[in-house]
Amino acid sequence: MARRSLKRTARRTAHGARDKAQAAVSRKGGRIMASHANGEALCPGSSRNGSLSQEKMWAYGLGLFGIGLGLAELMVPRRLARMIGAPPRHDGLIRAMGLREIASGVGILTQGSSATAVWSRVAGDAMDLACLGAAFMSNRSHRGRVALATAAVSGATLLDMITAQQLSRGIETRNGCISLTVALVIDRPQQGLYRHWRELTNLPTFMKHLVRIEIQDDRRSHWVAKGPAGSTVEWDAEIIEDRPNEYIAWRSIEGSQVDHAGSVRFEPASGGRGTIVTVEMEYRPPLGTVGAAVAAWFGEDPNQTVKMDLRRFKQMMETGEVITTEGQPAGRAESTSRK
Amino acid sequence: MKANCWYGKQDMRVVDVPDPKILNKKDAIVKVSSAAICGSELHLYNGFVPTMEQGDVMGHEFMGEIVEIGPEVKQRRVGDRVVVAFPISCGQCFFCKKELYSLCENTNPNAWMAEKFFGHSPAGIYGYSHLTGGFAGGQAEYVRVPFADVGTIKIENGFSDEQVLFLSDIFPTGYMAAEQCNIQPGDTVAIWGCGPVGQFAIRSAFLLGAERVIAIDRFPARLQMARDGGADTIDYEETDVYDTLMQLTGGRGPDSCMDAVGLEAHMPGLLYYYDRIKQAMMSESDRPIALRQAIMACRNGGTVSIPGVYGGLIDKMPMGAVMNKALTIKTGQTHCQRYLKPLLDRIAHGDVDPSFVVTHRMKLAEAPQGFDMFNRKQDGCIKIVMTP
Ligand SMILES: NC(=O)c1ccc[n+]([C@@H]2O[C@H](COP(=O)([O-])OP(=O)(O)OC[C@H]3O[C@@H](n4cnc5c(N)ncnc54)[C@H](O)[C@@H]3O)[C@@H](O)[C@H]2O)c1
């Protein structure tokens, strides 16, 4: 036990840049992410638990912006009204809008950028746009300025909506990466689990998005995954770290169609209760159709998807196969259950 | 084959569906000889359980003859007569090894759905919504039984179907609920609900040494059956339940209280409408009327056992009473497999003849009428057994 953690510390120091992110994770072990042979990480500085995702950063930004705008609306409503070309004598309304902005902003900052808080901004935007629309109709307003203000608010609305949508779908990217960590305890010793996983050709039997893996040599393999409309997406990967019974890390060869890195760790659970299997994955989806395919593999909730993969692995290791309901009777046309 | 399928709230139909096939190596196919309707299914029937899909085959209390086995079924053979436990359990995981079969980690292919609702998933269950796997149930001519070695008990000849059928659910459920009451000599156990689960709980409480059982319901036939089982009874429409229980126990309260009613509890008076309205408005999914009473009536330091099913959120839970009275709460879907053998032994020994609970017999084709009758508790209906 002591030796293992020593090793890990040594390794972590080698990846000094990531230490800060790891400090936030008080878990035993911390994050060890795959890197290219030249030592450059696929998603430098990214840690699901440690650093903020892009979506969360956007949300914070929007929250802060909202508070600033809200304060201005609250304190100098008349100046603001003139700036956006709104008719005068609506101080009360503008102050109310300011309070709304501040409330949403504070909501975002205090609720850790929750999707709901950002959605409240979207609702507020809709109200603002409605008011601007009314202002535009009024003949006491400066239409040119109102139009400009409307354009600005529309832009903000779009940003709010995209951010809220991503957050509610549970999609968080870091430096353009989808990254996730999932752990599941399996009631089997490390050795067998490691062996089954290290036989990479087994992965497609429980990882839904993979079609097959072809072994090239001890370290290299060729991965084939589902692409859009029956096509496939392919890349070569290499094992970059392999500690028997404990840890396997792999990543795609530089210049591959899909930039992917993954690792799996096998640690004994306390009290001899099997093994805690922790999978970390990072995908940097390229633009275009391949990117869309990668996004589709992980669907609405990437963590959930990988957890299901891991659960199938557990079923196989504990019971010998993956339990299914596909093909059972039902009084409807296609008789499968939802997946 | 014919199967009784769910098509919507209070809409069951017996239709033709494909025969089941072996899909996993440890599956068996059972030709159903008897299947019952369970109180739990009323929650699906009345639309309180989400994730049902049109065409889902119902039924989790059934037995029959094995007609086909997968290549890895080791302890059962074609021709065996078996009763099937309602939770589907792998027998290999952490929970199965602890005999907590209804918490099996490997049998719910839709575990992610249940995790969204409950944080963690229970085991798969036959014909009990997609939240618990969407497995086709046994109100059919044939049914697929996954993990047949773990989930079935072989019945040697000499017993009628009606004597052993309820090993599939309600006998173990009543028994486990009584076991959870931690009954000590001299104890009084109060049981809300004299449906089939309550009936078996009454008998089990006596088997486990209760001195007195007080059973609560409002239907005369059910109260009569409870008295036949040795219980004192309270009709909650006639008298105040709390006051009566206090009179019967010298003000201390029953040592254990059991909620064998579940999320569709009924009650005369205003509170009932409060909960019905909240349920209709979706701000409360379950009506915990019996549960609240059980908690309030239970003696200090006593145990509240909850076999009654809850699915989501409840309102006005008297947590202050639970805490200040130092109550123990025990609940769960029944770990049915754990009780198959010991309770079959009890039946063989003559301690209980479970067929007492059967009030109606019909054909599978009449299942929709059966559901309607059982739901409305008409015609003294307590338990329906269907044959093909
Ligand atoms: N834990 C398990 O594994 C498990 C297994 C089977 C059934 N169940 C559950 O047990 C419960 C009972 O099942 P059942 O088959 O006996 O159903 P049932 O519907 O036949 O019986 C419920 C009884 O409760 C009575 N009741 C309603 N409101 C009451 C109240 N306020 N006070 C006292 N009695 C009241 C009804 O009149 C009825 O007789 C259901 O919730 C069912 O889902 C749980």
Image: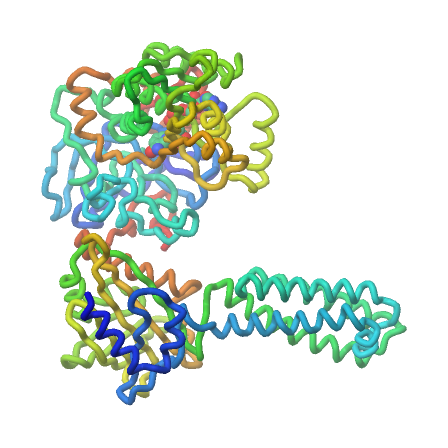
Q: State the quadrant of the C terminus of chain A.
A: bottom left
At 20% across and 30% down in the image, what residue appears? B340
Question: Percent x, y for residue A42?
Answer: 35, 81
Ligand 1 quadrant assignment: top left
* Nearer to me, B374 or A286: A286
Q: Residue furthest bottom?
A: A38
Task: Indicate left or right for A240 with B187 as reference.
Answer: left
* Nearer to me, B262 or A59: A59
Task: Indicate left or right for B144 with A292 as reference.
Answer: left
Q: State the quadrant of the N terminus of chain A.
A: bottom left
- Quadrant assignment, res A306: bottom left
* Nearer to me, A246 or A264: A246
- Quadrant assignment, res A260: bottom left
At 44% across and 12% down in the image, what residue appears? B250
Can residue B388 be seen by looking at this rendering?
A: no
Is residue B248 shown above or below B365? above
Is residue A68 shown above or below B79? below
Question: Percent x, y for residue A253?
Answer: 27, 84
